[in-house]
Amino acid sequence: MNGTIRADAGPVIDSHTVLYGVIGDPIRHSKSPVMLNRAFRETGVNAVYAAFHVAPDRLAAFAEGARAMGMGGFNVTIPHKTAIMAFLDEIDPTAEAAGAVNTVVRREDKLIGFNTDGPGYVRSLKEEAGVELAGRRIVVLGAGGAARGILHALAQEEPAHIAIVNRTAARAEALAQSLPADVPKAALGPDDLREACADADIVINTTSAGMSPNTDELPLGIDAAWMKPGAVASDIVYNPMRTRFLMEAERAGCRTHGGLGMFIYQGAYAFEYWTGQAAPVAAMRETVIRALGQ
């Protein structure tokens, strides 16, 4: 070795390097570090991105630490997307309406929250599944932080109806009530899922069911046979890229849409909030696919 650093070896860290990261509980499964560090390398931004395991009772301490260290910003994943809002100085109106934040930007000493999940998901669904959402009947499985951002983005697309299905009916109802009044909607429990699927044009899993290593799980016990042939089965899980839900839906004659595109686009929008530069989406996608071993 002659001391030369390969272009793909990682960023050269110096006293001007800005720190970014992702927080969650758990977090070690995340591919955000490989994706965002590739984005920084591609664009020449002097920054580094790491994963931080933050327990729910340490969120306030992390937010204060982010200010103290001068972090440029951070992403937020399960289960902190709603709880983090209490420790931010400002929240973008879209994230406020959704009741969830997945991207935080530090500007001077203020932490400002945004939601890139919803726009990232809708962009991916339209581009990769080739569907128009206006006039469609949509079933959303789950009522957590990811569902919030996705639902509020879907609501802007003028769907015919949105049904939110969750094990805890009260959470589904609260989320339904947060959507604009002119959006036809319903809050349902698992017992209503079969009937809802029969009429759905699109069924979206926003839960972590089926995520590695628990790849045998199905969201809310759904049976793909309940869906009509030609409907779109969509899953925000990206590891594995094809979940059990998607594989069974395909066998049932449905079109499928995986979570990789949403993951990449939400990260791309976060990168653009942080840097003001266009995200190198193709390079980000290539890096994640390689990291997943696909």
Image: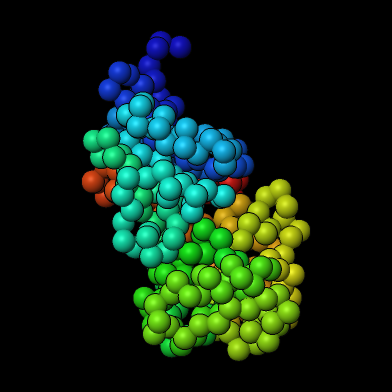
Point out residue 162 in the picture as x, y percentages from the top left corner: 51, 80
Q: Quadrant of the N terminus?
A: top left
Looking at the image, is 253 positioned above or below residue 141?
below
The number of callouts visible is 0
Which picture quadrant has residue 248? Answer: bottom right
Q: Is residue 261 above or below residue 65?
A: below
| Image coords of residue 252 (percent x, y) | 70, 79
Q: Nearer the viewer, residue 51 or 5?
A: 51
Image coordinates of residue 283 in percent, x first then y, are 39, 46
Apparent side of residue 201 relative to residue 276 in the rendered image (left or right): right
Q: Name the colouring of the figure.
A: rainbow
Residue 82 % position (x, y) = 49, 54
- The residue located at (44%, 60%) in the rendering is 99
Left or right: residue 86 compared with residue 31 = left
Q: Give me the residue at 69% from left, 82% from top.
A: 192
In depth, the one of 244 and 172 nearer the eye is: 172
Q: Is residue 223 visible?
A: yes
**Up/down of 5 relative to 174, above or below:** above
**Residue appearing at x 37%, y 45% in the figure:** 88
Looking at the image, which is closer to me, 157 or 191?
Answer: 191
Left or right for 277, reference 2? left
Q: Decide if residue 41 is in sight here.
A: no
